[in-house]
Image: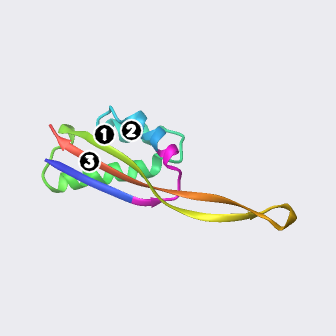
Amino acid sequence: MEYHATVKYIHMSTKKVRLVADSIRSLSPRKAIDMLTLMNKRAAKPLLNVISSAIASAKAKGAKEDRLSFKTIEIMGGPMMKRWRAVSRGMAHEYKKRMTHIRIVLEEK
């Protein structure tokens, strides 16, 4: 059986979150939580919350935590906020504040 958890609109670049997600993809969810608590990256906290939520969802439906594994970890780009910065000669340069969506799917072995 599959158990899902999703978090949307994280104010962080998708590339930064993917770097952390790739490091935990091959681990079990319990080991991933242990590793994320020690990791010194800002992207670790939202991933930690989503994995904890997926585990809680699985437990609520009667799954055993030691039998869970990651089926997919999807890091998707969200909307971008477009902002402007004033520069010389009355012009402006655009920059984008990116957002990320995270979706975790756990399966029971």
Residue 97, position as x, y percentages in the image: 58, 59
Depth check, mark 3 against mark 2: the one in front is: 3
Quadrant in which the C terminus is drawn: top left
Q: Earlier in the sequence, mark 3 or mark 1?
A: 1
User: Which contiguous range is marked in magenta?
Assistant: 8-17
Q: Which mark is residue 34?
A: 2
**Helix, strand or loop at mark 2:** helix
The residue drawn where x is 38% and y is 38% is: 34
In percent of width and height, residue 54 lies at: 27, 52
Three-letter amino acid code of the residue under disc 1: Arg
Density class for disc 2 (Cα within 10 Å; few <14, some 14-19, many ≥20) is few
> For the point 29% across and 55% down, which residue is it?
5
The residue that label 1 is drawn on is 30
Closer to the camera in the image, 100 or 88 = 88
Nearer to the camera, 97 or 68: 97
Q: Secondary structure at mark 1?
A: helix
Q: Amino acid at mark 3?
A: Val
Q: Is residue 73 positioned above or below 7 on the image? A: above
Residue with the most extreme top position: 26
Q: Are marks 1 and 2 in contact (CB under 8 Å)?
A: yes
99 sits to left or right of 69:
right
Q: Is residue 19 magenta?
A: no
As measured in the structure, the alpha-carbon distance from the residue carrying label 3 to the one carrying label 1 is 14 Å
State the SS at label 3. strand
Residue of label 3 = 105
Residue 38 % position (x, y): 47, 38
Q: Earlier in the sequence, mark 3 or mark 2?
A: 2
